[in-house]
Amino acid sequence: MLDIRLIRENTEKVKERLQVRGKGDEASVDLILEVDGKRREVIAQVEKLKAERNSISKDIGARKAKGEAADDLLAGMKEKSDLITELDKQQTDLDEQQRQLLLSVPNLPHAACPIGLDAAANPVVRTFGEKPTFTFKPVEHVALVEKLGLVDFAAGTKISGSGFFVLRQQGARLERALLNFLLDLHTREHGYTEVSPPFLVREASMYGTGQLPKFREDMYQLEGEALFLAPTAEVPITNLHREEILNRNQLPISYAAYTPCFRREAGSAGRDNRGMIRVHQFDKVELVKIVEPQHSYEQLETLRKHAERVLELLGLHYRTIELCTGDMGFGAAKCYDIEVWAPGSDSYLEVSSCSNFEDFQARRMNLRYKTEEKKNVFCHTLNGSGTALPRLFVALIETGQQEDGTIQLPPVLHSYFGDSAIR
RNA sequence: GGGCAGGUGGCAGAGUGGUCGAUUGCGCACGCUUGGAAAGCGUGUGUACAGCAAUGUACCGGGGGUUCGAAUCCCCCCCUGCCCGCCA
């Protein structure tokens, strides 16, 4: 949520920054200011009346305490109160209008963000390794996992429907190895605090991180309950500190969490949905940072390096792209996607997305910290999907596949997996 | 699922219609004291909104109502805790 003061005081700048997203959001700005203007007029009016009422009421109380009559003071008070009630209603109404408008406006892209309309305009900012070469034609993961009995898609469909899969035997074990590897890496070497949160969250939490009100259709909600299945660990983890005022010396806070993620993927049926690439439930290790504003961009780089390090240790070729203004998510001010190479599919798969939300989420969540000057300032929140497991899984086995049908695993996984290869 | 009790400032905990943004204690900050610390003493200690400012307004879980006036009375909702039942 943007700061109304920022919109008021830097109107043209805000419009310009919204315009570069290319979604026409800048049109809301004038409307917001119009509502804000009316709102402030009403506030000025009603507060003046309230001040009068309070002062006269006080006098009435004082007289009654002394046993004196106060009829002269009471005259006209009822009317004044009724007027206040009426103006209060107007103000509540305008407040709500303004809130809804503000909630529907995306974050302002950082000044350094590349400008563009869609994914085609995203520059590659880093690559690691090279596309591996094969002496044979590499196979796509679907064929690979079925042959080795790692994943049973039919069983997933039977149990839960399309978009679900069952990991079996070495497949299940590889996933478990990856989870442990990821959590160990981030907690032991990158200094993150491990957290295991609930997977079901209440509505207030979904508002906090911005899934609601705009993206209700993408979420699973429990029938008859005000609970949602978390679409990412970002929701429970960031909400750990909702409505809090942190001490400066607590920052930065860094969390790593494994959770499953639940997504309806409504409207995406038939698109990109082969195998494990786009599913309704997947595991992920998420990284979340809560930081001071002045450090948030260096922290974003750090976060990104931590996410990239995963792929580097696994010896996977990847590229990191910076999202352009038109392709960036709703709440992000700057965002990197890390895409790992999947040779069997001959494509890059997004496994990780590292965003700086600046104070966009913190404002919604009322998450602040106390500065040395004892000012309460909104924190900046960052999050990076440390890695979406199924896609990492896909890249790993497609990259490690051998001509004899086995899959060679990178050395860092040997002890976690208990073997050097899947055979 | 059945029954009950509660939601007040960082925390604990008073307050049942008027000078209460709220007694007090703890905590915290600063000062005095001390060789230094503890103790003790003193002072201070919420947030948001409006306003150039002085200042004003709002907030005792949320919303509505009664009243000149509500933390306090009435209604609805949300949340938390406890007991019983059921259950991994």
Image (cartoon, rainbow, N blue to C red):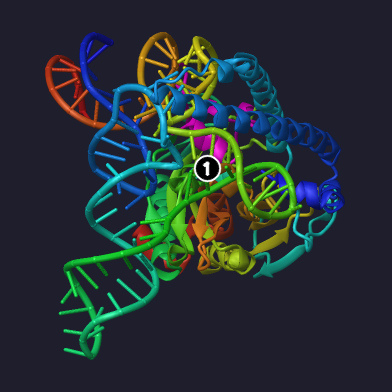
For image coordinates 67% across by 18% down, the residue present is: A83
Residue A71 in picture, x, y percent from top left: 54, 15
In the rendered structure, the answer to whether residue A385 lies left or right of residue A61 reads right
Is residue A333 depicted above or below A314 in this figure?
above
Provide residue B79's location: percent of width, then percent of height: 38, 29
- The answer to whether residue A24 is left or right of residue A162 is right
Q: Does residue A262 appear in this view? A: no
Can you say which quadrant of the picture contains the C terminus of chain A?
Answer: bottom left
Element on which disc 1 rests: loop
| Figure check: A30 above or below A71 | below
**Magenta residues, start to end:** A201-229
Residue depicted at x 46% and y 68%: A190
The image quadrant where one finds the N terminus of chain A is: top right
Q: What residue type is labelled 1?
A: Thr
Q: Quadrant of residue A355?
A: bottom right
A135 horizontally vs A406: left or right:
right
Tell me: residue A114, above or below residue A20. Answer: below
Question: In front here: A391 or A238?
Answer: A238
Residue located 49% across and 48% down the image: A238
In reply to whether residue A219 is colored magenta, the answer given is yes
Q: Residue at x 72, y 31 (%)?
A: A45
Tag 1 subunit: A
Confirm whether residue A258 shows in the render.
yes
A400, A38: nearer the viewer: A38
Q: Nearer the viewer, residue B10 or B43?
A: B43
**Residue B37 point in image, percent of width and height:** 23, 78
Residue A206 is inside the magenta segment: yes
Residue under numbered circle 1? A232
- Label 1 packing within 10 angstroms: few (<14), some (14-19), many (20+): many
